[in-house]
Amino acid sequence: MGQQILNGIFVGSIYALFAVGYTLVFGVLDILNLAHQAVFMLSAFVALALVENAHLSIWLALPLAIIAGGLMGIVLERLAFRPLRGRAGSNISGLISSLAMATVFEAIALQLFGPDTSRFPQGTFPDRMIQFGSASASLLQVCIAGISVAMMAVLTFLLAKTRLGRSIRAVAESPRAARILGIDVDKVIMLSFFLSSALAGAAGVLFGLAFNSISQDVGRSVELKGLAVIILGGMGSVPGAVIAGFAIGLVEVFTVAYIGSSYRDAVSFAVLFVVLVARPSGLLGQVAVREA
Amino acid sequence: MEDFYLAYQSLIAFVGINALLALSVYATLSCGQLSLANAGFMAIGAYTGALITLHAPQVPFGLVLFISAILPSIIAVPLGLPVLRLRGVFLAIATIGFGEVVRLAFVNWDFTNGALGLVAIPQRTQPWILWLMVAVVIFVLARLRGSRTGYALEAIREDETAARTMGIETTRYKMAMLALGAAIAGLAGALEAHFTFIVSPAGYGFGRVVDMLVQAVVGGTAMLFGPVLGAAFLTLLPEILREIGARIGLAPGPFRLFLNGVILLVVILYLPEGIISLPQRLRRRKKAA
Amino acid sequence: MKRALSLLFVASFANSASAADQGAVIGVAISLTGPAASYGAQQKAGIQAALADLGPGKLDVRIEDDASTKEQGITVFQKFINRDKVAAIMGPTLSNTASAADPLAQMAQVPVLAVSNTAAKGITDIGNFIWRDSLTEKQVIPGAFKKAQEKLQFKTAGVLYGNDDVFTKAGYDVMAKALEDLKVKVTGTQTFAKPDRDYNAQLTALTSAKPDVLVVSALADNAAAIVAQARQLGWKGPILGGNGFNSPAFIKNAGAAAEGVMVGTSWNSLSKDAANQKFLAAMQKVGVNPDQFSAQAYTGVLILAEAVKQSGGKTTRADIEAGLAKIKDFETPLGKFSFTADRDAQHEPSVQQVKDGKFQIVQ
């Protein structure tokens, strides 16, 4: 039982990290960025290439891959989202253009790295187990959970206390009002994408490290899980995404342990459903979810 | 020439099936609802049709198709009631969830062999049946557009709150279109099942409904032929790329995928009303020149 | 290896030069993109190696991508049958695609040689023109499990399988029955989906019941991660796998965790037979680490060439169909190969165990 709780915390921390970026862009632009999972995937490959081919230590490859993810976000914003701004029905168009970019990213990953699954080479991370009573976790798992939480804390601080954070929140509230107040809305949006995609990149690298598996379809299942997380947490709410990420991770694990693994994904979607029907703003969200 | 037709008859059939699916998405888009549940409805229709044919082969095909269309539309009602109150992206997400739950249900259901699916379904779908169904669906949707219902739908799409204040019963219309879209998707599912000999959960995931949406939007939703055109374009595109690739010595692989993504991006950025708006745009461009 | 693979990919952008215009025209439909792309890539390498070994003029092979979908599988089959007028078709990679596309070939009386379809139903039972050289799990697992039990003497088992893929689900069905026949008690059954990467919850649940062995039905990618995570969670007992484990990718990605894993496989990679050694050499020349998919695809080419030979060098569809029926005890990398009365594959399967980072035969 203790082991299962650890399992849940562990996978939950990665879900949370993924979802936080997802929800950030939604809060700011009201758009679901379907290329988020592609950045997640491609950043993992970047880290892999840095470790395997450039022989960098993972401690250097991780921040570099995170920055690479952020840059991918900027590319995304420029190519797929900015041209659509101000257009009516931009929600659907944004969905589709982000999807197109995801396809392009996947094709790039396929071309550069092939269709086979890869993993970080042995010895990328020291191999050590830590005991927590009757349960055990690897040093890697503990670090991953720790890094995830740290990054989310930094983001929360950034949003709450810095000027950039305030600008982001202002733009999320109303781009027009923000512009009137003198905020460079274009730059703020670009930076939001950078942040969001950097987080996706971090989640991707940590995921690849955690589960020994990097391939161009790793993003797919996490993407749908991520939807459940941001809905549960409340669209646009970063602390909500964090709590919900852990919650869904634990729910999944306990479904496997006590109901049956075949129901694991179904339960996540059931949660998604129930939240949307009963309390659409999620745990901490404030975005208008229903028509009047 | 006949060989050419024989070589591509299934491709043409897939255009027809995808046209139906794109039209099913159009049904809900026409009143401004982004519903992504249709892969789930398609699966329900496909499995229903296959099960009837396999267990009760004496049932005439027309009846099988009818039941495969009705059942999803009935299921659409309890889905729609809670979910149609949600706006925009939230409706989309809820319906994505529904689609995934349907797929997972079929993966886990022993009666339908789970992942193995149902095989050896007799090929009852003939091209003429398929295109007849496409024509019927277009006819129905066209009549709807021109009628008072059509105006109500357009009003809801433009501004739902205003429509409601004008006295239009928005929920009822939205529900009707959700059910109609579900019926069309179910019909397409059954037609496809009886064309490809097999149904399996793999074909009805998130990727499928995204394809439908893309085909409808890329084609353009201003005219009914838009989704049909979009379906034709995107179904034929991989084959066109395959032929071009063979001519210029490009081996099959990621490049096709890359091109697919790029073309989609270009269309959505520069032809926002879809391909169907192309002649209009060119005319405008000529006038301005 | 990665560099060799990327070179292969760059080189593959040039059109795969098919053999000279003579020889039987063979259409190959495999998954070069989509979820099954890694198997398709192995298959392509195996096919091209076989063609190189066969020499020019024997077979005119056209390779097309079915994108792992039944729609494109059907489209490609129809193109092969009606436009390219092939004498035979090899593939497709996935059983689901096969169930959708093979009936077309059957109706047009074009022989199909499946080289990776392992579903028990829906392949060769479509009709007399559908053949396969890939052993089904039913032909491999019972013998493998029996031998494993002789060695390990296990009485209880925890089972983990992929329930959303035909390969692994079909494998599980056979495994469950084999365990039942061996009077092994199943202490728990868990499932996963192919895109999953985190198996900790399932493995924790299974191992907490303390079974004697863990039985896993998974494809190579999932298998590697499953085994690695199982070891990490502290599972020290034996692990039994099916056909999907039979891949160097499994050992590479699982690392030290692969040690001791026992698998029932249809391709004996260690066979010293001349045919197998030739295959291994050919694959080494192009820098590809071969697995079961490439072995079965390579064999498929050899079988088709042999079918042509058996029909006296004639290359029409009927001739190849007749030629296939005559194949008996044919020397291939899979061993002495024949077709069963139902056109399924027949050759000796093997049981292997990972020792010192390599597969070894279990005597």
Image (cartoon, coloured by chain):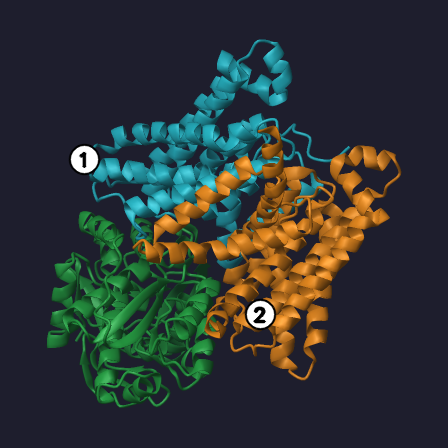
Q: Nearer the viewer, residue C344 or C144?
A: C344
- The reply to whether callout 2 and callout 1 are in contact (CB within 8 Å) is no
Q: Which residue is mark 1?
A: A55
Image vertical order of residue C172 relative to residue B256, above or below: below
Q: Is residue C126 left or right of residue B225?
A: left
Residue at the farthest right position: B167
Q: Residues within 10 Å of mark 2 (few under 14, many from 20)?
A: many
Image vertical order of residue A196 relative to residue C236, above or below: above
Amino acid bearing label 1: His
The answer for which chain carries disc 2 is B
Res C85 → quadrant: bottom left
Residue at the farthest top position: A182
| Callouts 2 and 1 in the same chain | no
Whole-percent x, y for residue A4 in the image = 44, 47
Tell me the mark number nearer the camera, choosing from 2 and 1: 2
Image vertical order of residue A3 relative to residue A286, above or below: below
In the rendered image of this protein, which colour is used for chain C? green
Q: CA distance from mark 2 to mark 1?
A: 51 Å
Res C244 → quadrant: bottom left
Chain letter for the orange colouring in the rendering: B
Q: Which residue is mark 2?
A: B193
Amino acid bearing label 2: Ala
